[in-house]
Image (spheres, rainbow, N blue to C red):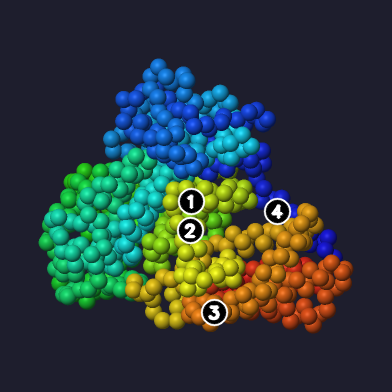
Amino acid sequence: MRMLYMVAIIVTLAVSLTTDAQEINSLHLMPWPASVKTTPNSPPLLIQPSFTVGLHDSSDRHLRQAVEIFLSDLRRHTGSTPLDFSVSNGNDVSAAKLAVSSDHPTKEVQELGEDESYTLEVTASGAQLRGTTTLGVMRGLQTFLQLVEVTPQGFAVPTVVIQDKPRFPWRGLMIDAGRHFMPVEVIERNLDGMAAVKMNVFHWHLSENQGFRVESKRFPKLQEMGSDGLFYTQEQVREVIAYAHDRGIRVIPEFDMPGHSTTWFVGYPDLASAPGPYAIERKWGVFDPAMDPTRESTYKFLDQFIGEMAQLFPDQFFHIGGDEVNGKQWNANPKIQEFMRAHNLKSNADLQAYFNTRIQKIVAKHGKTMEGWDEILRPDLPKSIVIQSWRGQQSLADAARQGYRGLLSSGYYLDLMGTAASHYTVDPFADGAANLSDEEKQKILGGEACMWAEYVSPENMDSRIWPRAAAIAERLWSPENIKDVNSMYARMDYTGKWLDAYGLTHNTNYVSMLQRMTGNSDISGLRTLADVVEPVKGYAREQLAPSEPTSLTPLNRVIDAARPESATARQFNELVNNFLTGQIKPGMELQIRSTLNSWRDNETQLSAAAQSSSLVQEVAPLSHDLSMLGAAGLQALDYLDRGEKAPEAWKAQELSVAQSAIKPRAQLLLMVASPVQKLIQASAGEKPTDLPFPKNASD
Ligand code: ACM
């Protein structure tokens, strides 16, 4: 019986393996470079305290800075002391262990499409890194860092020849600092993470209904009345931009208009389409307030505001948002209705297009190129603008067909708690874009991962971004044919730990959040459970909320600590699949049993903490189900070991345990019901099947 379904599963696994390069299994590079050649069995380059980097041209300030950052990162990754490693110039270069050269300096203000290619050759005696520009050198230095591994001889880099360049010129991460403010150090450590995986655009979402986050000297009531005191000073903005520039990352501000703009109106109610007063919004969702597109005073204000921000943010691009205007204030305002009739604007979309046309001229007057969410796409705007597609891949293709440049974010929303694989398999050139001509495809610049912040705080944001954003970074950097999901996960799991060196908190804060929930006592039981749950998917968190969440709701529950994708559950599922398909390795059953044992005992383990903490109490029903699943899995293994077919009545009862375990509780999903179901089915001589989550768990 078991053999039959084994064949089916083996076929599925084989089909998913599309790359088989030996290198991809042995190196931890992410994103995977365009070309990698290793020489097996040749000795590596040892990273010793005398390690020096030689610069051919020390007059390039950015090159020197990039190397200083690299050396500091190398110290972090090897635990070396600050005085280890050095930079040498000119004559000393030949003696350096890593010789670095760049054909062209990078621009003072980094530009879209600057060459990021590099070659890196490593032998036991030394390494050479050459970038066409200093940006290429920065990317190559990150590759070198990722090659550093611990060996029996100490830290070392294997012999390798890498030629690399990105597939797309725009590889971004958007952080929403509007809904929850993210302090500068949170932004900067995430810039380190971005640089590590070769992302090159930080899209900073700076104004929302819940917060206006930048100091305006011209209109100070924006931050004074619209931010609860949580905003970036202009000095801090300049610091972040410089920090990003040193790491080859452009910074693009987004000021969302005409909707998502309640906080502008707290201090400046005349901008709105209905009389005030206005207050900072605490709830989540799409709200009625919108700028009044019919009054000249609105454009006068925006001209001055955009002028001020265009000076502050040096990047060529300026994002005006433009999404989700519900039009209710416009419908209710007789003057706006009259304006629409007079100007032959037949719909609210026409009125918003009129607004966008005016704003585009202002943005252009201040020397910038306008960017906006896909709602702004209308043929009356000049072809220079950039469209960011969030409502589906089709809008990206539509934009390209009409001659507009575009970016993909649909499919890259990190806040929706999808798997890394679900993001990894989204390609900017697929779906709607698959039938574009080559010329039209040129209009697709790349994509951006989006970290919307209804449910993220400075404490847990890193864990929503990392390591999943690394999978998106690879999709946007690496060749299209690098798409083996198993290889991606192996490298992403490694990268997720490796990023700790940058002070990112996706691993450390998980532990401290669980500790807080148990009152700083033993977390082992809670951790066992938290390791195998995931937050509900899509927009289900709102739908399943016991009371309406707001920006004041604490983000301190298990759902806030739980990883968007449980590596433990994924790995257990794989282990069970391998076990049931006969790919049995020594110790495999023991490993499965010991995991099931810890689950079976979870309810007992957790009971004391559950009694003393409401935050733990909330997950007690999940712990109960985990214990039931652990016990069922162990019994199933006993049947399999004895070669005895599990009785029908037992099977039916245990399958119903698994079935009820997948119901969301505390807005969490128990991710191991499916592999336990497979064990139960196999023990009863049935074909193991995946257990689908109920519909309301995902949207
Ligand atoms: C968006 O998600 N409203 C751009």
At mark 1, the secondary structure is helix
Residue that label 4 marks: 13
Q: Can residue 375 be seen in this view?
A: no
Assess whether mark 1 and mark 2 are in contact (beta carbons under 8 angstroms): yes
x, y percentage for residue 225? 19, 67
In space, the residues marked 1 and 4 are separated at their CA atoms by 31 Å
Q: How crowded is mark 1: few (under 14 residues within 10 Å), some or many (20 or more)?
A: some
Who's the residue at 38% across and 19% down the image?
A: 90
Above or below, 207 relative to 548: above
Q: What residue type is labelled 3?
A: Ala
Q: Is residue 524 left or right of residue 332?
A: right
Q: Can residue 254 be seen in this view?
A: yes
Assess whether mark 3 and mark 2 are in contact (beta carbons under 8 angstroms): no
Q: In this view, does 59 lie to the left or right of 440?
A: left
At mark 4, the secondary structure is helix
In space, the residues marked 4 and 3 are separated at their CA atoms by 40 Å
Q: Residues within 10 Å of mark 3 (few under 14, many from 20)?
A: many
- In which image quadrant can residue 680 be found? bottom right
Which residue of the protein is positioned furthest toward the right in this rendering? 643
State the mark number for residue 500. 1
x, y percentage for residue 205? 32, 57
Task: Compare marks 3 and 1 and give the one earlier in the sequence.
Answer: 1
The answer to which of 135 and 363 lies nearer the viewer is: 135
Q: In this view, does 236 lie to the left or right of 668?
A: left
In space, the residues marked 2 and 3 are separated at their CA atoms by 23 Å
Mark 1 vs mark 4, foreground winner is 1
Q: Which amino acid does label 4 sit on?
A: Leu
State the mark number for residue 610. 3
Residue that label 2 marks: 508
